Image (tube, rainbow, N blue to C red):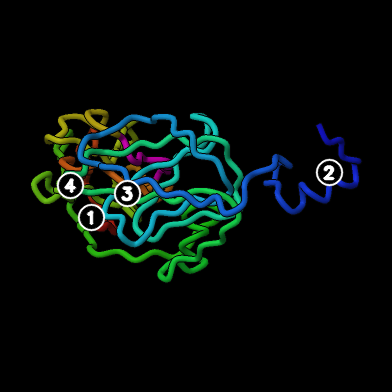
Amino acid sequence: MISLTSQQREFFQELFGNKRGIPFPQGNMLKQQIDLSVAQPPTRYDFAGDFLYCDRDTTGVIKVQYNSLAMPAFPFGSNTAINGFPYETVYLSWEAQTNLVANVWHGYGANIIPPNQDISQILSTVDVQEQGFDYATSFSSSSGLAANTPQNIIAAASNTAGYVLHNANWTFTFAAIPQVFSTLLAKTTAPTTATDGDILAAVKNANAVAGGSQHYGWLDRITRVSSGKRLDRITGSLESGAACGCLYTLL
């Protein structure tokens, strides 16, 4: 067995080691095509490297958790890449996407910049800071709602492949000062109460005004909702006035 001095070891690790100082073989760039037709919960894949890339022939979307299930899940679609992030294993998950695939490239030493991925998209992917976004559809309404009567924003029949809710804000008034819950809900059928579904956003502030109270709700962050679910606003008491606006994209 050859014994290396500390200086020699540092030299070879600089040339051939990843960011954790572990040697790796040169030219390690591998590809795996994954069929997304059947939904999969987070499952371990023994990939290792410091970059991950879904190429332009990828037709679906997967979620990636690096090294641990405790890590946040990053969405990867066509021409998505993250470089310079060392990992020893990944956990991949996806919703059912019939006849769609993900072409996952992994390994060491590459710095892939997809042609349609500018710096704002990269920062959005790793959730470093808020970036501007493009949206396809806007919704607005000034109708006050009856108690526990949903206002449908996106119909379930329209949501065939999921949707992204980019922004949502709403305000409403009461002729009194009650304790009330008002939410934006995702659900396959019409909700019957303000907690009957997946709560995407809720009222966060209220104050007394002449003759009653004013309440405010908003979406905290961009949210992706799976296919088949509608989007509704619903309030637990009768509103005497309201305004609601949403920006979203059907996928």
Q: Quadrant of the C terminus?
A: bottom left
Residue 251, which numbered label?
A: 1
- Which picture quadrant has residue 212? top left
Q: Residue furthest front?
A: 1
Q: Is residue 200 above or below residue 135?
A: above
Q: Amino acid at mark 2?
A: Arg
- Residue situated in front as seen by the camera: 150 or 9: 9
State which quarter of the image contains the N terminus.
top right
- Pick whichever, 168 or 64, lies toward us: 64
Identify the mark nearer the N-term, 1 or 2: 2
Local secondary structure at mark 3: strand
Which one is earlier in the sequence, the residue at label 3 or at label 1?
3
Q: Earlier in the sequence, mark 4 or mark 2?
A: 2
Image coords of residue 191 (percent x, y)? 16, 33
Measured in 3D between alpha carbons, the distance from the residue under mark 4 to the one under mark 3, in whole angstroms, is: 10 Å
> Image check: 119 left or right of 222?
right
**Residue for point 39% across, 64% down:** 133
Label 1 and label 2: CA atoms lie apart by 51 Å
Crowdedness near tag 3: few (<14), some (14–19) or many (≥20) residues, C-alpha within 10 Å: many
Which of the two discs, 2 and 3, labels the residue nearer the N terminus? Answer: 2
In the rendered structure, which segment of residues is drawn in magenta?
Answer: 199-208
Which residue type carries mark 3?
A: Ala
Neighbour tally class for label 4: few under 14, some 14-19, many 20 plus, Cα within 10 Å: few
Cβ atoms under marks 1 and 2 closer than 8 Å: no
Viewer-side label of 2, 3: 2
User: Which residue position is annotated with label 2?
Assistant: 9
Cα separation between marks 4 and 2 = 48 Å
Nearest the viewer among 26 and 200 is 26
Give me the disc on residue 102: 3
- Name the residue that disc number 4 marks: 99
